[in-house]
Image (spheres, helix red, strand yellow):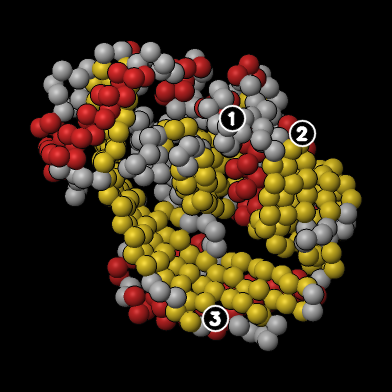
Amino acid sequence: MKLNNSVTLFKQVVPSSIDYWTLRLSFDTVESLDVRENVLQPPSIKQSCGAHITLVHDGGIAYAATSQLNIAGFTHAIEQALRWIEITNQHGLVRAADYPRPDKSGSYQTPVLEAWGNSTASDKISLLHAINKDLNISDAIVDYQATLSCRETESLFVSSDDIKIEQLFHYIIPGFYAVANKGSQTQMRTGGGWGSARQGGLEQLSSFNFPKSAQQTAEEALALVEAEECPTDKMSLLLLPSQMMLQIHESIGHPLELDRILGDERNYAGTSFVTEDMFGHYQYGSELLNVSSNASIPEEMASFAFDDEGTAAEKTFLIRNGKLERPLGSASSQTRSQLSGVANARACDWNRPAMDRMANLNVEPGDKNMEQLISSIEYGVLMDTNKSWSIDDSRNKFQFGCEFGRVIRDGELKEIVRNPNYRGISANFWRNLASVGNDSTFEVWGTPYCGKGEPNQMIHVGHASPACVFSNIEIFGGA
C-alpha cells in the first residue's frame, strides 16, 4: 500500500515510553463527472491524505492529526497529543486502562469486476450525454442531469501492539434526475441510484438501472405533474426499499447509536428516545422486525473487515423478532456503558476521530413477494424514493415525504399520486409492521451523506431492506 512508508517514519519519532498508541492513515480520491441539460460541468478530482494518531499514556488519552506524513509532521502531532493528555487526563470519558486495544490483524478489499479506469473519461461523458437525451423527452422537462462518480479509499491502521490492518475500498456513485413543470405544478423524479452509492466498480451500475431507467424517470416526472394529490387518511403503507433506507436510518439507526444515548450528541444532533435500560426487553417493533448490523455484504456502502478502532466486524442482530437486543456502540462506548455493541467506530477522514456511526444497518427479508404484499392491502399507498424528511431531536416523532406514490385498492395497484407523505412515532411505527417482503423484494441502498459530530463528519452508511407493509399509518398529500 502507498501508506506503509509513513508507518516507518512514525515509528522513528513516537517515544518508546508511550504506554500505547495507534496510527490510522488514509488516502482518499474522488473523481466526479456531471452533464446537466446536455452541458458538461467542470470535472473534478479531489484527494485527501493524512494521519490520525491516538496516544494512551500516564492515565490519559488524546489524539491529533496531520497531513504532513514526514518526520516533522508526526513529531508535531505527537507533541500536540501529549499536551492534550496533560490538560485532559483527569476528565476522560474512558479510563486509559480500558481503552480498546484490538488483538487481530487483517485486511479487506472491495471486490471489483469492472474498474473505473477500464472506461475512458470520454466514454463516461458520452454515456452521461446519452442519459441526458433520454431524460429530455418533452418541453415540460425543465431541468435534467446525470452524474457518475467514483471514490477510492486506502486505509492503514497500526498499533504499538504490532497490529496491522490494511483496507482498500472502491465506491461507485451514480444517478440522474428529471424535473417536470406544468403551470404552477413542478415535480422531480430521480433514478439510477441518485443520492445513493455502492461498493464495487462499474458493474454495480446495472443494479441501480443506470442508465436503463432514465426515460422511465422522465416519464414518471411528467406523470406526477398530471397526477392528483395523495389522499389523506389512516391506511396501509407499502414502502419500497429506496424509502425503507431513510426509515431505517432515521428511526432505528440514529436512535440506537450508543454515544447519542449516552448524551454525546445532545448539543448538536440530539439525543434518543432509547435509554440504556431498554436493551434486552423493549418491544421496538412487531415480531416481524429483524434488524442486523452486517458489514459482510460486498456491494453495500459500509462493508469492511475492521472498524476504525480495529474491532473485527461480524453480522450482529440489534433487533430480533421485534425485541431490542443491543445498541450501535463501538468498543469505547461499550466500555462506558457496559452494554454489548458492534464494530462501528468510524471516521469520515484522517482529520477526524472515530465515533459511533451506523455502518450497514439492514432489515432482514421476510416471506412475501411483491404481489402478495400488494394483494394484502385493502386500501393504502405505495411510496418510493424519499423527497423530504423531518424528525425530532430524540429521533422519535417524524414526517417523511416521497417522490412517487400509487394508490392500492382491493389488493391492486391503481393511479399515480403526487406528494405522498406519512408521519408517525418511531416507538409505535415499527410495531405496525404488518408484512415483510422476501429476497425478491430485497435491495441494497445507502447514503454517502450522513452527518454527525462536532466538528461535523459526513460519512457513508448502507441500508439494505425488502419492501415492507405498515398498517394504520397517517398518510397525507401536499408538497
Name the residue located 41 percent from the left edge and 48 percent from the top edge. 298
The answer to the question of whether label 1 and label 3 lie on touching residues, with beta carbons closer than 8 A, is: no
Q: Secondary structure at mark 3?
A: loop
Name the residue located 47 percent from the left edge and 32 percent from the top edge. 356
Q: Is residue 416 left or right of residue 58?
A: right
Residue 245 screen position, x and y as percent: 60, 48
Q: Which residue is mark 1?
A: 266
Q: Which mark is residue 428?
A: 2
Q: Which residue is mark 3?
A: 37
Q: Residue type at mark 3?
A: Glu
Q: Is residue 127 left or right of residue 317?
A: left
> Which residue is nearer to you in this view: 194 or 392?
392
Q: Secondary structure at mark 1?
A: loop
Q: Which mark is residue 185?
A: none
Name the residue located 35 percent from the left edge and 80 percent from the top edge. 122
Q: Secondary structure at mark 2?
A: helix
Q: Residue type at mark 2?
A: Asn
